[in-house]
Image: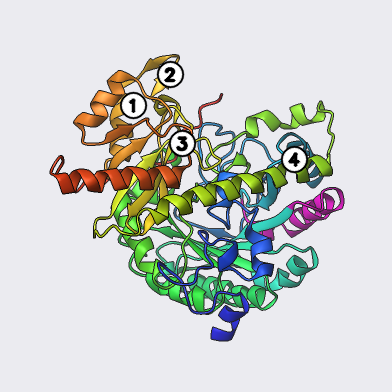
């Protein structure tokens, strides 16, 4: 297993202060061949997700397992969670949609098939889609997400089609725990239930992971954190997937709102709080690098991670579009993005050097309103989510995000909505925004969250470090006394508000 892990370029290192090959890794942290695979991949590179977009095409409706946290229902345009789509596509429709989106969104670098069922339970549609896209747009990276049950049977085809990023959802390596998550699987024309079903699923998942990594295919592991069911067990899952060469581990909160109609939701199973999720991610970070920027996307999501532009690219609209796939223009745009990334990195390193003489054990969280590009460039009232950064004398580190409903609706602030926003970032000491009105500013301050406008349109990490230096100076002078914050709520499937 150690040889498999080393084959991925990760070795045994990971976590804070160690050689990194996780989502926060930069060019200097990774072997050249790995960097080339992830540098423009918004799901596999935390830094890339500020700049590059992805899209999912819903060509795989059937599924071969049942999860207690999943309900694959359609025509739910106001929901953002896996398994939800507004329309299913044929491979031919999907291929045309990919080309149309890539022509309009030059930063779209990745095509993923993630359902709404399981891609490998729909192999003909899945691989036909990849084949058609690869013929027309060879610069687009191909990815799939799978539950792993059928994975060992399709590793050769995955490799044949140059699908070099695969995400496997692994929620357990103990079948007794798995039986609480999966009511049944359908394998070899037979339905299995209980512990036997979970055992078969786990064996196939881990074997498929080993087979993929042996071929040099990057594997990300998704795990759903279910308090009281697998939350403690996910540390063991983390070790197991790392030993088999997984590149990245993404621990996501359970979405369990009753209105989604899942077994867990209807049974009252709660999701984790923000502190519980971060504590588990931090614990696993010591073993392996973690993905912190996942948005639990819809199976037809389009755009930057954290946004969804799928409504702009419905089938009827695509059929009327005049598509001009200009590969030269796409490459020119992406080259410009690289220059922007370099400027951001330089600014971050310059500000970080100013922290070199600071000594403090203080670690705190701040929230950021951003539209992307690594900038503080969103109005507080227009934010649909806030990105969360942990800051200390070691610098600023992205650790998560919080979905919210927009505070401003039709030009007016909604006080009830403001209360939910405050609860979503209640563990933060400050919120960085491009602009904010007087009323929400006062309410945030009253709640102990400092609204910060002075860094509008500046780079996030640089600004967070600069603010933190000033905060430490205020503590040293006696101007303020640092007080710890409370816990925060994780928004269950934040609404998508159409532009």
- Give coordinates of residue 299: x percent, y percent: 61, 45
Q: Is residue 307 visible?
A: yes
Whole-angstrom CA distance, mark 4 to mark 1, is 35 Å
Which numbered disc, 3 or 2, marks the residue closer to the eye?
3
Mark 1 is surrounded, within 10 Å at the Cα level, by few (under 14), some (14 to 19) or many (20 or more) other residues, namely some
* Mark earlier in primary sequence (3, 1): 3
- Give coordinates of residue 68: x percent, y percent: 45, 55
**Quadrant holding the N terminus:** bottom right
Whole-angstrom CA distance, mark 4 to mark 3, is 26 Å
Q: Is residue 125 left or right of residue 287?
A: right
**Circle 3/circle 1 CB separation < 8 Å:** no
Mark 2 is surrounded, within 10 Å at the Cα level, by few (under 14), some (14 to 19) or many (20 or more) other residues, namely few
**Circle 4/circle 1 CB separation < 8 Å:** no
Q: Residue at x 67, y 51 (%)?
A: 112
Residue 168 lies in magenta, yes or no? no
Q: Is residue 101 left or right of residue 251?
A: right
* Mark earlier in primary sequence (4, 2): 4
Circle 2 is placed at which residue position?
409
* Mark earlier in primary sequence (4, 1): 4
Circle 4 is placed at which residue position?
102
Circle 1 is placed at which residue position?
417
- Give coordinates of residue 246: x percent, y percent: 55, 71
């Amino acid at each position: 297993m150690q040889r498999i892990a080393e084959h991925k370029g990760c070795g045994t290192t990971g976590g804070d202060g160690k050689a990194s090959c996780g989502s926060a890794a930069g060019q200097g942290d990774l072997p050249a061949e790995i960097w080339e695979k992830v540098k423009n991949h918004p799901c596999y590179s935390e830094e890339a997700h500020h700049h590059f977009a992805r899209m999912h095409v819903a060509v795989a409706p059937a599924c071969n397992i049942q999860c207690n946290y999943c309900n694959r229902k359609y025509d739910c345009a106001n929901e953002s969670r896996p398994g939800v789509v507004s329309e299913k596509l044929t491979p031919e429709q999907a291929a045309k949609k990919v080309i149309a989106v890539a022509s309009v969104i030059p930063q779209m670098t990745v095509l993923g098939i993630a359902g709404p069922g399981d891609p490998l339970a729909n192999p003909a549609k899945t691989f036909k889609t990849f084949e058609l896209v690869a013929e027309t747009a060879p610069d687009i990276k191909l990815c799939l997400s799978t539950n792993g049950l059928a994975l060992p049977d399709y590793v050769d085809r995955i490799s044949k089609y140059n699908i070099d990023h695969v995400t496997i959802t692994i929620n357990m390596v103990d079948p007794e725990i798995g039986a609480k998550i999966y009511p049944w699987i359908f394998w070899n024309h037979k339905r299995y239930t209980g512990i036997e079903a979970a055992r078969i699923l786990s064996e196939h998942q881990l074997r498929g992971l080993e087979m993929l990594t042996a071929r040099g295919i990057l594997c990300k592991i998704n795990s759903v954190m279910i308090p009281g069911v697998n939350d403690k067990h996910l540390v063991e899952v983390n070790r197991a997937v790392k030993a088999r060469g997984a590149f990245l581990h993404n621990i996501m909160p359970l979405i369990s709102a009753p209105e989604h109609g899942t077994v867990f939701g209807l049974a009252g199973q709660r999701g984790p709080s923000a502190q519980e999720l971060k504590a588990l991610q931090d614990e696993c970070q010591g073993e392996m690098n973690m993905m912190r920027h996942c948005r639990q996307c819809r199976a037809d999501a389009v755009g930057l991670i954290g946004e969804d532009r799928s409504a702009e690219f419905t089938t009827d609209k695509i059929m009327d579009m005049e598509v001009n796939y200009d590969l030269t223009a796409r490459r020119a745009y992406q080259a410009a993005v690289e220059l922007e990334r370099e400027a951001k990195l330089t600014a971050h390193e310059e500000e970080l050097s100013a922290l070199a003489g600071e000594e403090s054990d203080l670690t705190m969280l701040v929230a950021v309103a951003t539209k992307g590009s690594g900038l503080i460039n969103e109005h507080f009232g227009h934010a649909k989510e806030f990105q969360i950064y942990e800051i200390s004398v070691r610098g600023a580190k992205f650790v998560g995000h919080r979905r919210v409903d927009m505070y401003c609706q039709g030009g007016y602030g909604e006080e009830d909505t403001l209360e939910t926003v405050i609860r979503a970032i209640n563990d933060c000491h400050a919120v960085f925004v491009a602009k904010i009105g007087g009323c929400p500013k006062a309410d945030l301050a009253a709640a102990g969250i400092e609204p910060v406008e002075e860094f509008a349109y500046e780079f996030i990490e640089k600004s967070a470090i600069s603010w933190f230096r000033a905060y430490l100076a205020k503590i040293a002078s006696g101007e303020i006394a640092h007080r710890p914050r409370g816990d925060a709520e994780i928004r269950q499937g934040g609404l998508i508000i159409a532009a």
